[in-house]
Amino acid sequence: MATLLRKMWESVSNRSCSGSGSNSNSAERFCRVLDSPLGVFDQIPSDILIQILKLLGPKEAAKFTLVCKAWRWLASDNRLWIYFLQNYQLEPWDTIFFAEINLSSGHPLPTLVGQMPQLSFKRIFGLREQVPGAVIIDGGSGYCKFGWSKYDRPSGRSATFLEFGNLESPMYTRLRHFFATIYSRMQVKPSTQPVIVSIPICHYDDTESAKASRRQLKEAICAALFDMHVPAICAVNQATLSLYAAKQTSGIAVNIGFQVTSIVPILNGKVMRKVGVEVVGLGAIKLTGYLKELMQQNNMDFESLYTVRTLKEKLCYVAIDYEAEKSKDTRASFEAAGEGWFTLSEERFQTGEILFQPRLAGLQTMGLHQAVALCMDHCHSAELAGDPDWFKTVVLSGGTACLPGLAERLDKELRELFPPQLSSGIKVIPPPYGADTAWFGARTIGNLSTFPGPWCIKKKQFRKSGLSLI
């Protein structure tokens, strides 16, 4: 560090002396600036000094805050530490900024209308470096994703519904076995790290029985984890985590799960069950089953449903205009492992079309766009305090929601259902991290500068106060 700074000073001194040819004058200037606030660097513009500190890196830059007040002021500049957050942290800068502004204080989330809190990004960087990290377990309706919050992606996944049955059933023994298996696969002791666990979107109603079922599920999850000596637990529902992954605190989370699709209104991180959660009896398994029927009708042979699911993921899409798509040549091929090549044509967009026209598959249920529009209408009628357009942001999640063209088609259908004054401002966001969107929302929490503080509950607190702290 000293060598780099010495070379930089010599370079600046030489440039300032060029044309004078006087080394003695340079020496005199060097002696004069020794008494200035920044010593020999007082003649160098602050933006150049910040560039020097960027080259040194965050650890060395932090040491300059101990030299004197002038260096402390310079080395604490937010521009410098924003640069370090952008280049030395795992998460993208816009995610870090969103999280530290909106999520650092935990629940209830702050209502930031036209105001921006003052942040010290030097302090945030230091705290984020010290965050212990967390084990993240996102037990979806079909597949569980797990990993460490310091990883850039989930380290593994398991077929939840095949190995452990219905995870929504609050059975202590089954949950204990489920979590023990996840920790075994991660090769980590439960007592070493806090855990962030996503709560499945279930028991949708605002009735007393539904509330009791949700509470029972959370209690069973916490009891199983604390009995495994987990130090702290953060439990957040999957819809909210998907919203956080999209850098939103309010909006409508649309999760296309394994068996059903849920449409969940969320305001400032809180599920608005009183407004109404919509559920469509149409999920990923129905789309896979419908593609299977179409392939059988066209005499295509395959050995397993896994092959059909793979073809759905690799070849299928949602048409922006279903009728117009029929006149196009849409043939495409994919080689399935162990089964050879498959060529699909109209099946590619017919599969996803049942999300909007369920009757094509013989299903008596609302289309996705109709269910989302109904939820939006309820939100609009509720006239809740805050941003009147909070419900116009729609965030998609779930593996099936990754079908190309789905977000654009849903946006189009919603605009056609509403008058201009309501359709203005509607924004449909495709899954920010694909099928792992909820897991990444949990990672955003796990890497907060304040984690685990305001987000977690410890065993002693759980035994004393129950779920009131979650």
Image (tube, helix red, strand yellow):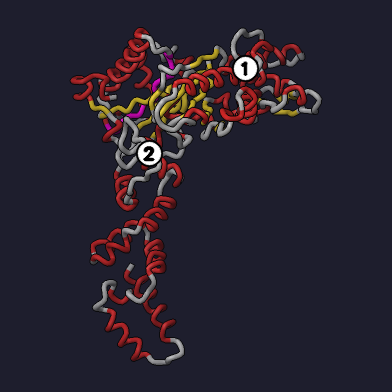
At label 2, counting other C-alpha atoms closer than 10 Å, the crowd grade (few under 14, some 14-19, many 20 or more) is few
Residue at screen point 20% across, 24% down: 461
Q: As rendered, which of 245 and 264 lies closer to the eye? A: 264
- As helix, strand or loop, the secondary structure at mark 1 comes to helix
Classify 456 as above or below 298: below
Residue 193 part of the magenta segment: yes
The quadrant in which residue 411 appears is top right
Instruction: Identify which residue is drawn at 55% across, 25% down.
Output: 399
Give the amino acid type for the residue marked by disc 2 in the picture.
Leu
Q: Is residue 40 above or below residue 425?
A: below
Q: Report the residue marked by disc 2.
A: 112
Element class at badge 2: loop
- Which label sits on residue 252? none
Query: Residue at 49% of width from left, 31% of height from top?
Result: 389
186 sits left or right of 312 in the view: left
Q: Amino acid at mark 1?
A: Thr
- Extent of the magenta region: 192-204
Q: Position of residue 182 (x, y in %)?
A: 39, 24
Question: Which numbered mark, 1 or 2, is in the foreground of this view?
Answer: 2
Give the CA distance from mark 1 to mark 2: 43 Å
**Residue 171 appearing in the image:** no
Q: Tell me, yes or no, whether the highlighted magenta stretch contains residue 104.
A: no
**Label 1 sits on residue:** 288
Q: Earlier in the sequence, mark 1 or mark 2?
A: 2
Residue 467 position, x and y percent, is: 27, 20
**Disc 1 vs disc 2: Cβ atoms closer than 8 Å?**
no
In x, y percent, where is residue 221? 32, 18
